[in-house]
Amino acid sequence: MISPTNAWVLQSYGGFLISKAILDDNLNLLHYECSFQNNEGSFLFENMLESELYEDRSYDHLFVPNYKVDSLYLSNFQYSNDTYYFTSDGNTGLVDLNRSNILHIPEPYLYHQTESNSFISINNARLHYENAHFDTVIDLKNCTNFEAFTGDHGFALQAENDHGNTNLLFEDRTKLDFEVDGWKKPRFDPDSTKKYIENGKKEKHKVFYVKQVNDSLIYIEDWNEDFRDPNAVPLRSFMYPAEDSIIYNPNTGFYYGVYPADLAGYYRSGIYDYANGNWFIPADNRIVVPYNNEYILFVPTLNELDITIGYKISIVNAAGERLMEKKAFNELPIDYQAFLMTRPELKAIFHQYEAFKLH
């Protein structure tokens, strides 16, 4: 089907990504050309320069081996430009695109804590925390109270059951050791866990937060804001490569440098029904706020580059019925507006977007 004369072959969903070395008459390497051959033998494309394939981000999904890919997004802007979450048939996995290596198989929910290369996955009532040095499974059906989060100093997990037993796990980010493979090894400090959990609950921003709602629902707060490199320099001019690209603003009469586009963040907050293995509130929100037996959802509004330009608000009742769908803040009843303005976890949103100010 595929001749054994290629530099490499990667089996992707629905076909094979193929790279072939192109040599001159003296067998010196000129460049590599790539093709994608579908399982039935036809080609999605042929003889594309390998460098062009890497530059065209619309083909990134082909570098994910075996799995159908519905979406791809960076898992962490600060630590890696190669590690991506990918969604496949409603589940989320993690892949190293540079090496085409699946780092974690898709689960209904998956979170990757980059510094220590730790994973938290939820599948039905099974919550699994794992890294190279530690592995534990929590049965949520046996919990009367469960809470976990990452904050300024590390990761903490607290699980209580009907027998009064409590499982505590604390990964102190300030006490991480560098390992040979580049990841950091966590040290677990049980004596500090209770104090950290209590202090962590008061933090204004938690990077990741999970809390049991009742005997069948668990709330997951997980989002990553769009990233703008504070050290970015203007792009080089196409016509004058030695100069910066500039654009003229007729409204101000000034010229401005053209900078690289922001990197799109992600929004994965929702409520998971672990008793039935489905999402009570889909994980596509910035945050979900409980109010009077209802849930207020902050749904991001994205531009054509998937950059956040604002939020709309939806309201869901305890039965899962949509009472209000993607309304502007000033369209909410006054009591809802007043309640939301008192919530400290929403201050960043109110400060950033003018549309959320009370008039």
Image (tube, rainbow, N blue to C red):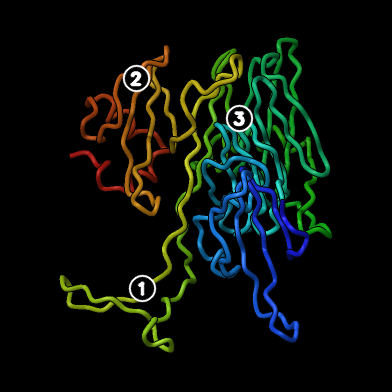
SS label for mark 2: strand
Residue 234 lies in quadrant: bottom left
For the residues labelled 2 and 3, the Cα–Cα distance comes to 23 Å
Secondary element at tag 1? loop
Identify the residue at horizontal 44%, vertical 38% (top origin): 286
- Residue at which label 3 appears: 108
Q: Which mark is residue 190?
A: none
Residue type marked 2: Arg
Q: Compare residues 341 and 289 and report the one nearer the observer.
A: 289
Q: Residues within 10 Å of mark 3 (few under 14, many from 20)?
A: many
Q: Which residue is mark 1?
A: 258
Left or right: 10 as drawn, with respect to 227: right
Mark 1–mark 2 Cα distance, whole angstroms, equals 42 Å
Q: Which residue is mark 2?
A: 322
Q: Secondary structure at mark 3?
A: loop
What's the CA distance linking mark 1 and mark 3? 40 Å
Number of the front mark, 2 or 3: 3
